[in-house]
Amino acid sequence: MLAVTDAAAQAIEALTSQDGQQETDGGGLRFSLRTADDASAQLALAVTRQPEQGDKVVTADNGAHVFLEQGAAEFLDDKVLDVQRNNDGEIAFALAPQQA
């Protein structure tokens, strides 16, 4: 199952707070798998108030939630969600393989 680093969990918590979605409301970050016109799969990412029916829910140690649509859950099963900062200090979510 997808692992979430502490840094990613803090970023999710900050995003859901900014969007007016307090942790008690169950808001989180949702990954879904979309098929593009050329039949390639792309991950879509959104801040949402609650999981959709059938989503798998990953809860980080700090209580931050990640909702995974079925296809995204399979794709991300062996990944770690983390954050990286660019030269301007802005953060972006990043995926890496889990260490065995």
Image (cartoon, rainbow, N blue to C red):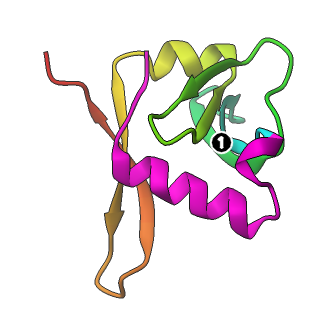
- Tell me the quarter of the image containing the C terminus: top left
Can residue 27 be seen here? The reply is: no
Q: Main secondary structure of the magenta part?
A: helix
* Image vertical order of residue 20 relative to residue 69, above or below: below
Magenta highlight range: 1-25
Q: Position of residue 91 (x, y in %)?
A: 43, 69
Q: Nearer the viewer, residue 95 or 39?
A: 95
Q: Quadrant of residue 7?
A: bottom left
Q: Is residue 85 left or right of residue 25?
A: left
Q: Position of residue 72 (x, y in %)?
A: 59, 23
Q: Nearer the viewer, residue 12 or 70?
A: 12
Q: Position of residue 31 (x, y in %)?
A: 63, 35
Residue drawn at the location 67% of the way across and 13% of the way down: 70
Residue 15 colored magenta? Answer: yes
Residue drawn at the location 69% of the way across and 31% of the way down: 34
Residue drawn at the location 76% of the way across and 54% of the way down: 22
The residue identified by callout 1 is 44
Q: Is residue 53 left or right of residue 12?
A: right
Q: Nearer the viewer, residue 38 or 41?
A: 41
Q: Circle 1 — which element? A: strand
